[in-house]
Image (spheres, rainbow, N blue to C red):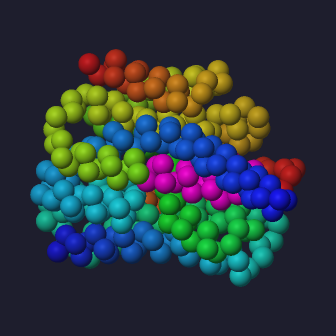
Amino acid sequence: MILFIILGMSLVTMIPRILPAYIVDKVHFPEWMNRWLNAIPYAALGALIFPGILTVKPDQPHIGLIGGAVAVMLAFLGLNIILVVIGAIATVFLLTI
Amino acid sequence: MSIKAVAKTEESARLYMIQKGISRGVPIMLGYLPVALTYGVLAKQAGMTIVEITLMSVLVFAGASQFMGAGMIAIGTGAIEIIIATFVLNFRHFVMSFSFMNRLRFIGLKWKVPLSLGLTDETFSVASMHTEEAKQEKGMYFYAALMITAYSAWVVGSFLGGVLGDIIPAVLSQSMGIALYAMFIGLLLPSVRKELRVGLIALIAMLVNAFSSQFISDGWAIVLGTLLGGLCGVFLLKGERQ
């Protein structure tokens, strides 16, 4: 039963990922649509960050926000992304112990 | 003689792209390992075997839906419900794949199809911040190496989580839950510094997602936020070079 669930989950995850590979070759998008697709990564990042960040510690949403604020500061200073990640982890760790 | 020289530069271009892909994949690895470990631990508690836990990561490779799947298995939800919920949650990858595949227009299907299978929120985000490689020689090796790095961290981490059970202190693995969000922030900020309008696009997507998640499922809220936020880009990124 679990195997059937895994195979089903795999299929419904693969299909939406794979379809665009076949579609983009067949059609040529108008300019505005290319701009839309080029803006998607930034929009996706925004949509993924908030409100997801509130769920880092579901019972204490402010901890995720503070960790995120530290990440924003570190990233704004131009630090390497690994340092940004480590800084945010350390912040949350210190706030929860 | 000259054929040999060409072969050599091709080889080094490929090697360079692979190295670059792995190094850009390291932050994803750092974010994936603790999350995958947590997934493994949770799935174990849900009653899944080590083989099932690892197989799910191998075949599905989508964090949020695997957490949801394990959770639903734990409470005895029916298979069809779990599969439909997975579809809803992962439909955002359709939008992301469209954007990414449009960048890879000039790369053959032979590469596009496997690369599309490696798309997650994280690999998509990192790959999208590296658009130059798509036009460069052997650039597809960059994306492939990036995805394989992330994928192996995800699969190995899930396996370890299933094996180790609850040896890892909960405080540490919970603190590491912020890693992926911190990575998203670290990816977004440099672009915002260069072009403030990018920040506006992200902000609109955030607001749409936060607002609509009150009424619809998280998966669809992310789809809506991404689509509407991106639509603002049609006007905001007007002057940008293509």
Is B19 in front, or is B133?
A: B19
Residue appearing at x 46%, y 49% in the figure: B150
Q: Please give left or right for residue A57 compared with residue B223 in the image.
A: left
The percent position of residue B13, horizontal first and vertical second, equals: 72, 51
The percent position of residue B170, horizontal first and vertical second, equals: 22, 32
Is A43 in front, or is B123?
A: B123
Q: Please give left or right for residue B80 compared with residue B227 in the image.
A: left
The percent position of residue B116, horizontal first and vertical second, equals: 55, 66
Residue appearing at x 64%, y 75% in the figure: B109
Q: Please give left or right for residue B138 compared with residue A22 in the image.
A: right
Is B21 in front, or is A97?
A: B21
Q: Determine if the magenta segment contains residue B149.
A: yes
Which segment did they paint magenta? B130-151
Dominant SS of magenta comes to helix
Q: Determine if the magenta segment contains residue B57.
A: no
Is B227 in front, or is B174?
A: B174
The percent position of residue B210, horizontal first and vertical second, equals: 48, 47
Residue appearing at x 43%, y 59% in the figure: B219
Please tell me in which quadrant of the rendered image residue B144 appears. Answer: bottom right
Q: Please give left or right for residue B83 compared with residue A36 in the image.
A: left
**Is there any visible trace of residue B157 in the rendered image?**
yes
Please tell me in which quadrant of the rendered image residue B226 appears. Answer: bottom right
Residue appearing at x 21%, y 33% in the figure: B168
Image quarter hosting the C terminus of chain B:
bottom right
Residue A24 vs B164, above or below: the answer is: below
